[in-house]
Amino acid sequence: MSSIITTHLRLLKSPRLSSAAAAAATAAGRLLHTSAVHQVGRKRKVIPRVTKSQRREHALAIDQEDQENDIENLGEWDGDDHHLYGHLLMESIRDVRKYARQMKFEHPALAEFKKPFTAPSASQILRFESSATMGEKSHAKDRKVVMRVKVQDLGLDALVLRKFVLLAGPRYNPQTDELIMSESRELSSLLNKKRLADTLVALIEEAKKKDESFVDVPLDFIHYKYKPKPVFPKSWNPTIKRNKTKKVKKNAVNKNM
């Protein structure tokens, strides 16, 4: 290949070649470039041809759309239509009426599915928090689930509990003795809830392993900033005597006015 390219270069330098022959030799040399060699054997991308009639139809459709949206072709406003903010207000009113109709006609049919509220028992120590966006079928925030559990309610031994807190890391709140974890990698809140429960079970099983207890590793809660809780003074609580004095002062002020 290099010898052929060298031959073409020699032909280009030859003074006996005419301008047309030199141009043909130059084109042949470009075809034998290394980049052209790499293209040998590759499939060329077939681009569908567009006929003249299709181009004409496309151009006519664009012209018609431009004429419809042109300000100069709009008719005079006779006060029979709202402006943009009026249409937005009407759309919001339609949404409110839609949900009002659902509350009136569809929600009563759900009465047969209602269940009485039962407070969680002492064995139900896991608390899950999730959100639901009204008006949207699926939202990225709806699949996020937050799990909270009191570590003391897990019933672990002292060594196992210490190892569990070490494994939890910054997800452990030392002020409230809570383990807080969140999950949003799955496509639904139920799957994220299941993933959190499996993670908690895996943490407990890992903490119960006796191969390594990590006794020499100190517990460090530098990740948490303690938040002081102010105590409400008992002297500020309303009493019957204080309420009577307030009423007397208020009545005195009203009489002076």
Image: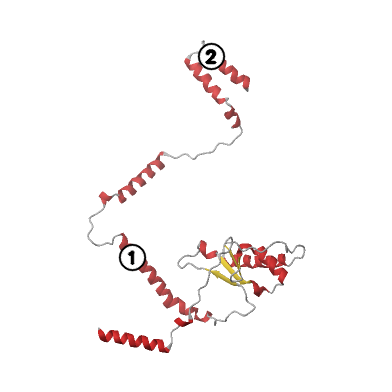
Q: Is mark 2 on a helix, strand or loop?
A: helix
Q: Name the residue under label 2.
A: 13
Give the residue displayed 31% in from the left and 61% down from the top: 85
Front residue of 57/92: it is 92
Q: Please, what is the three-letter code of the amino acid marked with disc 1?
A: Leu
Task: Inspect the image, locate mark 2, and give the three-letter code of the amino acid beneath it.
Answer: Lys
Circle 2 crowding by C-alpha within 10 Å: few under 14, some 14–19, many from 20: few
Of residues 87 and 222, the one drawn nearer to the viewer in this rendering: 222
Quarter of the image for residue 166 reads: bottom right
| Placement of the C terminus among the 4 image quadrants | bottom left
* Earlier sequence position, callout 1 versus callout 2: 2
Relative side of 116 to 219, left or right: left
Q: How far from the left and from the top, in percent, is residue 228?
A: 53, 70
x and y percentages locating residue 157 in the rendered image:
72, 72
Q: What element carries label 1?
A: helix
Vertical order, 31 against 48 (above or below): above
Tell which residue pokes out farthest to the top in this image. Answer: 16
